[in-house]
Amino acid sequence: MFDKSTWIRLPRSVVVGHGVLDRVVSVVEELYLDGRPLIVTSPTPRDLAADRLRAGFEDVGIDPAVTVVESATFSTVEDVLAAADTADAGYLIGLGGGKPIDIAKMAADERGCGLISVPTAASHDGIVSGRGSVPDGDTRHSVAAHPPLAVIADTELISASPWRLTTAGCADIISNYTAVKDWQLAHRLKNVEYSEYAGALSQMTAEMLVERSDSVKRGLEESAWVVVKALVSSGVAMSIAGSSRPASGAEHLISHQLDRLAPGTALHGHQVGVASIVTEYLHSGEGGEWKRVRDALAGIEAPTTAVGLGIDDEQFIEAMITAHEIRDRYTILGDGIKQSAAIEAATVTGVL
């Protein structure tokens, strides 16, 4: 007897394009959100866009509350919940990059209220996914939460962000290429549940970005358009899967281990991009697709080497051989790879 069921939560509205920050109030009205909004942001996006966002609400007689987060921690989530109580907030707006949006996402989930995601940078797919990432000591937790009700991505604003943030977002999407392979491997060897739809969507998104990497150029607003649409697609794939599997495999485990070994050295997207070069080599050998992954990263000016990340060779190899310890998720790393295999993969691909 077939008794399988699923509950897929997706954003109701995705608004992308030039100047769409001014449509936030219209989106709120369309979603029938009531009460006072609490804008959750961090210092730089607050200075860039918070006044403009508040002005849109004030024009219709609404006075939004604002809280500024400095770090992504579980205690910060509690601080945002306290701010929401004080403001008697009806819903939250995450304004900024991954940090404030992830914190707002988890706080909204805990509070049981709606969330609108307003990214000011396209640095990773957390702007739309149903997961938040929080460091805790020397580890990092991926926390399930409801995805935002709406994503409003102003390409004019995003294209003005530091170029390295955009390339990090591109690299995060390109890494889906190997994440899906790890998911398929876990399905074959460990009988991990696999979604053909989510896997195909994630892989197609990575493929499209690899193919269009030559159109992602510094100072070009259309580049922000391409990257944001890819990040939305990746986030939807995770919502369909009900997990981060479509966008997180061995390359993310290596990145999380690099966060332990060299905290704050490189951006998450850049780390998973470089790690995807070596994990692709582990999947398919010297004649595989790793050159295509590397060339796509190089084409958008993202790092392709440990040196480019600012990571020592020894640290990168250590991350490769210990990354399997991060979490119970089967990948091409299995129960760990030998140092000689890690050195070979990183040397042949030019990562070292």
Image: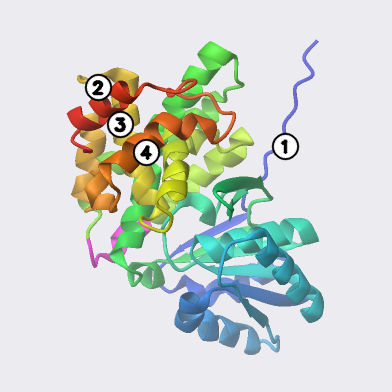
Under circle 2, the secondary element is loop
Which label sits on residue 206?
4
Q: Which residue is mark 2?
A: 288
* Residue 222 lies in the magenta-colored region: yes
Which label sits on residue 30?
none
Residue in the picture at 70% in, 85% down: 62
Q: What span is colored magenta in the figure? A: 218-225
Mark 3 Cα within 10 Å, few/some/many (few <14, many 20+)? many
Q: Amino acid at mark 2?
A: Gly
| Mark 3 vs mark 2, CA separation in Å | 11 Å
Which label sits on residue 278?
3
| Mark 3 vs mark 1, CA separation in Å | 35 Å
- Quarter placement of the C terminus: top left
Query: Vertical placement of 80 versus 249: above or below?
Result: below
* Residue 276 lies in the magenta-colored region: no
Tag in front: 3 or 4: 3
| Mark 3 vs mark 4, CA separation in Å | 16 Å
First in residue order: circle 2 vs circle 1: 1
